[in-house]
Amino acid sequence: MRDFLPQNRPLLILAPMQDITDLPFWRVMSRYGGPDVYYTEYFRVHRDSRPEKYILRSINENPTGKPVIAQMIGQDIDALQRTALELQKRNIAGIDLNLGCPAPIVCKKEAGGGLLRNPEKIDGILRELRACVHLQFTVKTRIGFDAPEEFPALLDLFRRHPIDALTVHGRTVREMYKPVLHHDAIERAARLMPCPVFANGNVACVESARQMIAITGARGLMIGRGAIRNPWLFDQIREAWSGEVQTRPTRADLRQYIEHLYEETRDPAMREAGLVGKMKKYLGYIAPGLGEDDAFWKELRPALTLRDLFAICDRHLASSETFPINCVTLS
């Protein structure tokens, strides 16, 4: 990953979010500058698995012109090796192992964040994957399953393997997406790991990006929810680091972004209720904090039709008022 690192600013990465940061969303992001590197949604890997075709489309039809890292989740070593070899036949820059997903259904299968309870298993997986991955091999992890005190031992484990980058989400699995973020754990990783470390969690504006880099010394930022809320964020960070005047979108610009989301992500085969639900996935990150007492989001939540949903958007966003770029706590 060192070849991707910009000289005078952090590397900017779109965080993989299952069923959200898919190919259509990549198309939207590319309209707004987008990140430097894209990570796919995770490929679910088990004994009988084959790479999901809809995720492969993100690789095969990559509209961004930017490098792609294919992420895998699973705990079957043979299956992980098989999938890594198959994915490396595609136009990707590397393979990432997900050790961070906190979803209970994933953790029960001892995958994602659930693997953090079994360091010996992780050790074997990293050894075998590193042996078969000839591209970049990266890991995305949380700082422990139950408690932050688990992280030093996990970090020692990661240091034993020649991985090319480590992304650290500064929460434990049990902390899910609570506001607390353990910057000290990310700083420890950035100081001790021989590879670049990327920080993940709570970066929602330029100021929080500056603080994250200043506190942790990370070489890059992986941003998910903050980029969904503000697709201009990656360009704003680039502008801030280069000393340029920051892009200042208006509410009307935000309304157009929502229209782009709908145009790109709508599935013609999906019923209206499904389309409304999909848009609310995105709007759940966009709307909170807009309007007095969260008025925008409170009106949106009970909307059942596209007509009502977009009428609410029009009422709240049809103005040239600057869209606030201050940080909002995303939960």
Image (cartoon, rainbow, N blue to C red):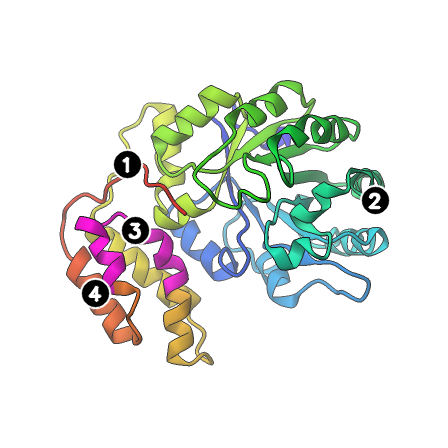
Q: CA distance from mark 1 to mark 2?
A: 44 Å
Which badge, 1 or 4, comes first in the chain's sequence? 4
Numbered tag placed on residue 43 in the rendering: none
Magenta span of residues:
280-299
Cβ atoms at labels 3 and 2 below 8 Å apart: no
Q: Dot 1 corresponds to which residue?
A: 326
Which badge, 1 or 2, comes first in the chain's sequence? 2
Please, what secondary structure does the residue beneath circle 3 have? loop
The residue mark sitting in front, 4 or 2, is 4
Q: What residue appears at the point 27 percent right and 69 percent down from the top-left corner?
A: 309
Let me know if residue 314 is in the magenta part.
no
Please, what secondary structure does the residue beneath circle 1 have? loop
Describe residue 261's horizontal placement relative to residue 24 as left or right: left
Q: CA distance from mark 3 to mark 2?
A: 44 Å
Q: Dot 2 corresponds to which residue?
A: 132
Cβ atoms at labels 3 and 1 below 8 Å apart: no
Q: Dot 3 corresponds to which residue?
A: 288
Please, what is the dominant secondary structure of the magenta stretch? helix
Q: What residue appears at the point 79 percent right and 43 percent down from the top-left corner?
A: 133
Callout 4: few (<14), some (14-19), or many (20+) C-alpha neighbours within 10 Å?
some
Cβ atoms at labels 1 and 2 below 8 Å apart: no
Which badge, 3 or 2, comes first in the chain's sequence? 2
Above-or-below relation of 16 to 307: above
Q: Position of residue 64 (x, y in %)?
A: 50, 50
Callout 3: few (<14), some (14-19), or many (20+) C-alpha neighbours within 10 Å?
some
Q: CA distance from mark 3 to mark 4?
A: 14 Å
The residue mark sitting in front, 3 or 4, is 3
- Indicate the amino acid at tag 2: Cys
Which badge, 3 or 4, comes first in the chain's sequence? 3
Describe residue 291's horizontal placement relative to residue 129 as left or right: left
Numbered tag placed on residue 312 in the rendering: 4
